[in-house]
Image: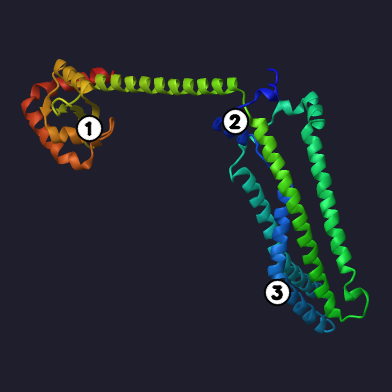
Amino acid sequence: MADVDQDQKTEQASEKRLEEAHDKGQFAKSHELTVIFPIAALLGVFVLTAQTVSRDIAEYSVEIFTRFASIPVEQGTVMVQIGEVLLTVGHALLPLLLGIVGATLLAGGLQSGFRLTPKVVVFDIEKLDIAAGFGRVFSKSVFARTGIDLLKLGAIGSALWFGARGLMYDPLFSSPMEAAYLGQFLSHATLLFLTRLLLALGVVAAISYGYEKFKTAREMMMTRQELRDEAKNSEGNAQSKSAMRRMARRLMQKQMLSAVKTADVVVTNPTHFAVALKYERGKDQAPVVLAKGENRFAQRIKALAAEHGVPTVENKPVARLLFAMGKVGETIPAELYQAVAAILAVVYRTHRYYFHRLKSRRLEVAA
């Protein structure tokens, strides 16, 4: 099928189109956001933990150099010292790693709406189309992406340049300073660079995400014919499902009517509800609902029961409760055991001949 000209796409994408596109990973996403979030997390964790981490490292350094001369150089002691170093460094780096991983996941989740895109990992042979690949290489989006990359490079370079130029006037480079000042200088320089870099990339990320949002919305637009076709298909699916439900209901009714002739009793309202029950000693734990219906279908159950001589008992409250609470193919609710037992007791006394024939009828139906 030939591609539709973009000028013909004048309608906003439908919800169905957007859902399908999202499952394929076609939604606005900016790579710059996945960079700026970890940088922001790195800056935040650094501000919160810098003093604590530097104090721990300083204390460990003082401790290790204080007892350095008294530590024997043996395999056991060397392994212990390496373990302590790794533990100290790990304690310093763990918050940074957790912050970066969490920020990366958050950036991806915000762009995808925290929803999975299962069709992204499915192999698509169309991605190997060489002609389509050349088309993507020389498309407008590639030139736009190149412009954003150049803008990003300029922003990063400017942030680093102005940051470095400001630090060159620090007293550290012009006069003797205490060794402790070096730590303060490094901390200040790191915060300065990260802050400038975060601000510069923030501007680029906003521009990039805005462009991706516009490009994706434009690509998802549909023609009027596509909207009509989608509506027609949706209507057809709804009609198909409705037809399947009607077919299943008719099949269920047919099965219920065929089971009425093996019932012990039919409890009626008498005009609105009819419920057919069976109970076989040694097989059923409680009476089982074979069929139930209301109004016209209830009349069909009653007529079929009369045709096969199935006893019919009029009990309005019990019939209403059986219809409301009972499920076809399952035993009756425990709350109705006593009421149904009383009905069956009467039926067993007054229709002995029917139950004598019922055993052979059930055997015929089972065969």
Residue at left 26%, top 18%? 365
Is 144 placed left or right of 171 in the picture? left
Of labels 3 and 2, earlier in sequence is 2
The residue labelled by disc 2 is 12
Q: Label 1 is placed on what type of residue?
A: Phe
Residue 186 or residue 345, whichever sits in front: 186
What label does residue 323 carry, if any?
1
**Relative to 9, residue 105 above or below:** below
In the rendered image, residue 60, in percent from the top left (x then y), is placed at 76, 77
Q: Label 2 is placed on what type of residue?
A: Gln
In the rendered image, residue 57, in percent from the top left (x then y), is placed at 76, 75
Is 293 placed left or right of 85 in the picture? left
Residue 307 or residue 239, whichever sits in front: 239
Is 334 placed left or right of 62 in the picture? left
In the rendered image, residue 325, in percent from the top left (x then y), is placed at 24, 37
Q: Secondary structure at mark 3?
A: helix
Residue 65 or residue 353, whichever sits in front: 65
* Rendering quarter of residue 12: top right
Q: Secondary structure at mark 1?
A: helix
What label does residue 228 carry, if any?
none
Q: CA distance from mark 2 to mark 1?
A: 49 Å
Residue 286 or residue 200, whichever sits in front: 200
Front tag of 3 and 2:
2
Q: Residue furthest top?
A: 307
Q: Label 3 is placed on what type of residue?
A: Thr
What label does residue 52 carry, if any?
3
